[in-house]
Image (cartoon, rainbow, N blue to C red):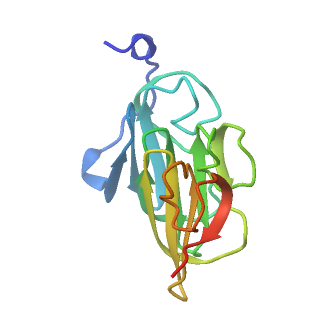
Amino acid sequence: MDPGASALASSTSLDRSVLLSLAAGSSHTCGISGGQVLCWGDNRFGQVGDASTEGRAQPVQVVGLPAPATQLVAGAVHTCALLDNGSAYCWRQNLQGQLGDGTTGNRTTATLVTGGRRFQSLFAGGALTCGITVDESQYCWGLNQNGQLGDGSRQSRSVPTAVVR
């Protein structure tokens, strides 16, 4: 068993029938219920998004989302939510800039992806995030050691960077 999972705290129980979607990282899971994002699991690095680092055996609400969520994506070390207003928010580990907030500082609550873009969908993998905007432009941010952001470089990016076409 994961050492961080041994001291999981309990919280309010959730009726599982109301979860509209799920996203799972390497040691945590999140779901959408009534537009709210709920997460549970290992929380040593803030992956649950409740402003703590205490493990959670039951769902708790992510802090810092100003509008209802419509989509969730999870990389190995972070999670992002697309809100109904087209904004994107991310939380947890940010060593490669995968939260898209212009920093490489970890976040235990949801933080806005910079740039003011309105997204229609998000994608995540490992330590990177990508999004398609409402005008169908593609952007990626985070780890780029193999050129996976598609910007023609191998430099990691902490802000959304246009995919070269």
For the image, the number of numbered tags is: 0
**Residue drawn 55% across and 77% down?**
164
| Outermost residue, left side | 17
* 104 or 9, nearer to the observer: 104
In the displayed structure, 157 sits above or below 59; it is: below
**Residue drawn 55% across and 73% down?**
163
* 117 or 108, nearer to the observer: 117
Residue 10 in the image: state x and y as whole percent.
Answer: 43, 22
Q: Residue 105 sits in which quadrant?
A: top right
Residue 29 shows up from this direction: yes
Q: Is 80 on the left-hand or right-hand side of 114?
A: left
Quarter holding the N terminus? top left
Residue 79 in the image: state x and y as whole percent.
Answer: 49, 48
**Residue drawn 37% across and 15% down?**
2
**Residue drawn 43% across and 45% down?**
126
* 130 or 56, nearer to the observer: 130
Residue 91 in the image: state x and y as whole percent.
Answer: 59, 45
In the displayed structure, 106 sits above or below 65; it is: above
In the displayed structure, 72 sits above or below 53; it is: below
Residue 7 in the image: state x and y as whole percent.
Answer: 45, 11
In the displayed structure, 135 sits above or below 7; it is: below
Residue 64 shows up from this direction: no
